[in-house]
Amino acid sequence: MCSSIHTLDDREFDWVNEVRYFGVHIVRSHKFKCSVDQSQTVLLPSSKWYFFQVGRLVSEEVMVQLLKQKCLPIPLYALDVCNLDKRSMQSVDLTMNRFL
Protein backbone atom coordinates (compact mmCIF):
# COMPACT_ATOMS: atom_id res chain seq x y z
CA MET A 1 0.00 0.00 0.00
CA CYS A 2 1.40 3.38 -1.01
CA SER A 3 1.21 6.34 1.29
CA SER A 4 -0.86 9.38 0.34
CA ILE A 5 0.69 12.34 -1.41
CA HIS A 6 -0.34 15.77 -0.13
CA THR A 7 0.15 19.15 -1.76
CA LEU A 8 1.27 22.29 0.05
CA ASP A 9 -2.36 23.36 0.49
CA ASP A 10 -3.17 19.94 2.01
CA ARG A 11 -5.01 18.44 -0.97
CA GLU A 12 -4.56 14.72 -1.42
CA PHE A 13 -3.74 12.98 -4.69
CA ASP A 14 -5.60 9.76 -5.45
CA TRP A 15 -3.70 6.73 -6.68
CA VAL A 16 -5.15 5.66 -10.04
CA ASN A 17 -4.42 2.90 -12.55
CA GLU A 18 -4.56 5.13 -15.63
CA VAL A 19 -4.21 8.84 -16.34
CA ARG A 20 -4.88 10.81 -19.50
CA TYR A 21 -2.26 13.42 -20.36
CA PHE A 22 -2.57 15.36 -23.63
CA GLY A 23 -4.71 12.57 -25.10
CA VAL A 24 -2.26 9.80 -24.20
CA HIS A 25 -3.45 7.24 -21.67
CA ILE A 26 -0.56 6.39 -19.36
CA VAL A 27 -1.03 3.12 -17.48
CA ARG A 28 0.34 2.20 -14.06
CA SER A 29 3.35 -0.07 -14.52
CA HIS A 30 6.90 -0.59 -13.33
CA LYS A 31 8.08 1.07 -16.58
CA PHE A 32 6.56 3.76 -18.82
CA LYS A 33 3.53 2.25 -20.57
CA CYS A 34 0.70 3.68 -22.65
CA SER A 35 -2.71 2.25 -23.45
CA VAL A 36 -3.99 2.33 -27.02
CA ASP A 37 -7.44 0.93 -26.24
CA GLN A 38 -9.13 4.27 -25.56
CA SER A 39 -7.95 5.95 -28.75
CA GLN A 40 -8.95 3.01 -30.93
CA THR A 41 -12.52 2.99 -29.67
CA VAL A 42 -12.99 6.53 -31.03
CA LEU A 43 -12.01 5.61 -34.60
CA LEU A 44 -15.18 3.78 -35.62
CA PRO A 45 -17.73 6.34 -34.34
CA SER A 46 -15.82 9.23 -35.89
CA SER A 47 -15.58 7.48 -39.26
CA LYS A 48 -19.30 6.59 -39.16
CA TRP A 49 -20.13 10.25 -38.58
CA TYR A 50 -18.30 11.20 -41.80
CA PHE A 51 -19.99 8.40 -43.73
CA PHE A 52 -23.45 9.54 -42.66
CA GLN A 53 -22.77 13.25 -43.15
CA VAL A 54 -21.00 13.31 -46.53
CA GLY A 55 -20.85 9.69 -47.71
CA ARG A 56 -23.59 10.03 -50.31
CA LEU A 57 -22.47 13.44 -51.56
CA VAL A 58 -18.84 12.79 -52.52
CA SER A 59 -16.92 10.23 -54.54
CA GLU A 60 -15.14 7.25 -53.00
CA GLU A 61 -11.73 8.86 -53.54
CA VAL A 62 -12.76 11.99 -51.67
CA MET A 63 -14.27 9.92 -48.86
CA VAL A 64 -11.08 7.86 -48.45
CA GLN A 65 -8.96 11.00 -48.39
CA LEU A 66 -11.29 12.62 -45.85
CA LEU A 67 -11.12 9.59 -43.56
CA LYS A 68 -7.32 9.46 -43.86
CA GLN A 69 -7.02 13.13 -42.93
CA LYS A 70 -9.62 13.30 -40.16
CA CYS A 71 -9.99 9.83 -38.62
CA LEU A 72 -6.64 8.06 -38.85
CA PRO A 73 -4.71 10.62 -36.76
CA ILE A 74 -6.94 9.85 -33.75
CA PRO A 75 -5.65 6.33 -32.91
CA LEU A 76 -2.15 7.10 -34.18
CA TYR A 77 -1.68 10.20 -32.03
CA ALA A 78 1.53 10.03 -29.94
CA LEU A 79 2.25 6.38 -30.73
CA ASP A 80 5.79 7.30 -31.65
CA VAL A 81 6.56 8.29 -28.05
CA CYS A 82 4.87 5.26 -26.49
CA ASN A 83 6.95 2.15 -26.08
CA LEU A 84 4.28 -0.33 -27.12
CA ASP A 85 4.47 -4.00 -26.23
CA LYS A 86 3.72 -6.76 -28.72
CA ARG A 87 0.04 -7.06 -27.76
CA SER A 88 -0.53 -3.32 -28.18
CA MET A 89 1.19 -3.29 -31.57
CA GLN A 90 -0.98 -6.19 -32.74
CA SER A 91 -4.06 -4.35 -31.51
CA VAL A 92 -3.11 -1.22 -33.46
CA ASP A 93 -2.38 -3.29 -36.58
CA LEU A 94 -5.70 -5.09 -36.32
CA THR A 95 -7.62 -1.84 -35.88
CA MET A 96 -5.91 -0.20 -38.85
CA ASN A 97 -6.46 -3.24 -41.08
CA ARG A 98 -10.14 -3.42 -40.18
CA PHE A 99 -10.58 0.27 -40.77
CA LEU A 100 -8.83 0.32 -44.14
Image: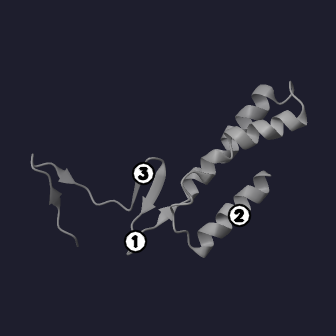
Determine the residue located farthest toward the left in the rendered image. Answer: 9
Tell me if 30 is positioned left or right of 7 in this view.
Answer: right
Image quadrant holding the N terminus, namely: bottom left
64 to 89, vertically: above or below: above
Task: Indicate the position of residue 75 as horizontal and vertical percent values.
Answer: 62, 51
User: Nearer the N terminus, badge 3 or badge 2?
Assistant: 3
State which quadrant residue 6 falls in.
Answer: bottom left
> Are discs 1 and 2 less than 8 Å apart at CB?
no
Amino acid found under the numbered disc labelled 2: Asp
User: In 3D space, how far apart are the residues under numbered discs 1 and 2 (Cα atoms)?
Assistant: 23 Å
Q: What is the tally of numbered marks visible in this picture?
A: 3
Residue 13 is labelled as: none
Q: According to the image, label 3 marks what residue?
A: 20
Residue at point 15%, 48% (across, down):
11
Task: Indicate the position of residue 72 as horizontal and vertical percent values.
Answer: 68, 47
Task: Indicate the position of residue 57 as horizontal and vertical percent values.
Answer: 86, 24
Q: According to the image, label 1 marks what residue?
A: 29
Q: According to the image, label 2 marks what residue?
A: 93
Task: Indicate the position of residue 44 as horizontal and vertical percent values.
Answer: 69, 45
Secondary element under disc 3, as helix, strand or loop, is strand
